[in-house]
Amino acid sequence: MTTLPGLRHCLAAIAGAACIIAMLAGITSADPLAKDVFGAKKLPAATQPRSHGFYSKGCFEGGVAIATDGPHWQAMRLSRNRRWGHPTMVKLLAKLSRDAAADGWPGLLIGDLSQPRGGPMLTGHASHQIGLDADVWLMPMPSRRMSAAERENISAVSVIRQGGLTVDERRWTPAHAAVLKRAASYGEVERILVHPGIKKKLCDTVSGDRSWLRKIRPFWGHDSHFHIRIGCQSGSPGCKPQAAVARGEGCDSSLAWWFTEEPWRPAKGPAKPKARDVMRLSALPAACRAVLDAPAPASEAAVTIGGEGRTVIADTSGQASAASAYAPESTPPKMPIPAARPLGR
Ligand SMILES: [Zn+2]
């Protein structure tokens, strides 16, 4: 039987414990895991498009979504809510889809761009944080429209031989090379990450203009999709550019390294946590706090880019009308300055 003083003592103890828990929670909520707060955002910040920080440590605002369906694309894994990017990125994908279709690639299956306000993700990707990265599957789009369930469950098929480092000749086609060439042809695109076996195939087979091979960068993964990275856009003074890619086609010893044992050697020692999983909000640029707090647009539809490079806005009568979602065209992108660059991306 609890006596009254005992109960009081107990209540005081509970209050004390609760107080300490609240204090600790206060500390964590003041500086939460960045992936938790950015992963929880359903809509972008309705502000001018701006990227803050670096591809693997930052956030962005003024994002737009690529529509789930366009004339020449279908977005995959819709449940992830990663169809968001800087307007330049989203417009570029729409353009690539049209150009690729004209080249003979039936359409794009679009993988992850960024979360609505970027930032680290709960799962996957170290980069894709500032609205300037997009994954496109190395599988041509089927002629039919896939259901949402199919878009969740269908797996991208690797173009690399199982257990090997070279392309599977049964899957690789000239159209694969053409879509990569087209993507690399845009001034905004600084890098395209692919499996080293894909880069090697291009090095071995591309004739005529080979200058675009410079932007095709060998990297781990990327055997069933390619990764388009555009440069920092004007209006984003806080965007940290990546070092320019090395001069030349990259078909040299830097590529040969990928066909040695070294890049594939398992890491020794205990597994380190991924940066994505431990990054606190305070590690991101200070502007990212304001990005989290910024108001959202009225709806996702208000900031979704359809096939014509325009947003589709549902008006009060339920009719869809089109309006431009972006600021006026910015100045043409600058070509990267050639500089020596270590191996990798
Ligand atoms: Zn990627």
Image (spheres, rainbow, N blue to C red):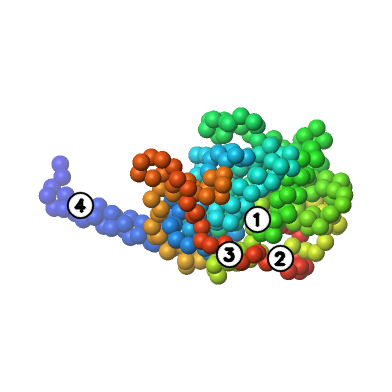
- Three-letter code, disc 4: Leu
Point 78% across, 63% down: residue: 246
- Three-letter code, disc 1: Arg
- Distance, label 3 to label 1, CA atoms, is 18 Å
Residue 92, compared with residue 52, is above or below; it is above
Q: Residues within 10 Å of mark 4 (few under 14, many from 20)?
A: few
- What secondary structure is found at the residue carrying circle 2? loop
Q: Are marks 2 and 3 in contact (CB under 8 Å)?
A: no
Residue located beneath label 2 in the image: 335
- Distance, label 4 to label 3, CA atoms, is 63 Å
Residue located beneath label 4 in the image: 11
The x and y percentages for residue 93 are 62, 49
**Which numbered disc flags the more N-terminal residue, 1 or 4?**
4
- Distance, label 1 to label 4, CA atoms, is 57 Å
**Which numbered disc flags the more N-terminal residue, 2 or 1?**
1
41, 220: nearer the viewer: 41
**Which numbered disc flags the more N-terminal residue, 4 or 3?**
4
Q: Residues within 10 Å of mark 3 (few under 14, many from 20)?
A: few
Foreground: disc 2 or disc 1: 2
Point 19% across, 54% down: residue: 9
34, 87: nearer the viewer: 87
- Distance, label 4 to label 2, CA atoms, is 67 Å
Quarter of the image where one finds residue 132: bottom right
- Three-letter code, disc 3: Ser
The x and y percentages for residue 183 are 70, 50
Residue located beneath label 3 in the image: 330
Foreground: disc 4 or disc 2: 2
**Which numbered disc flags the more N-terminal residue, 2 or 3?**
3
Residue located beneath label 1 in the image: 229
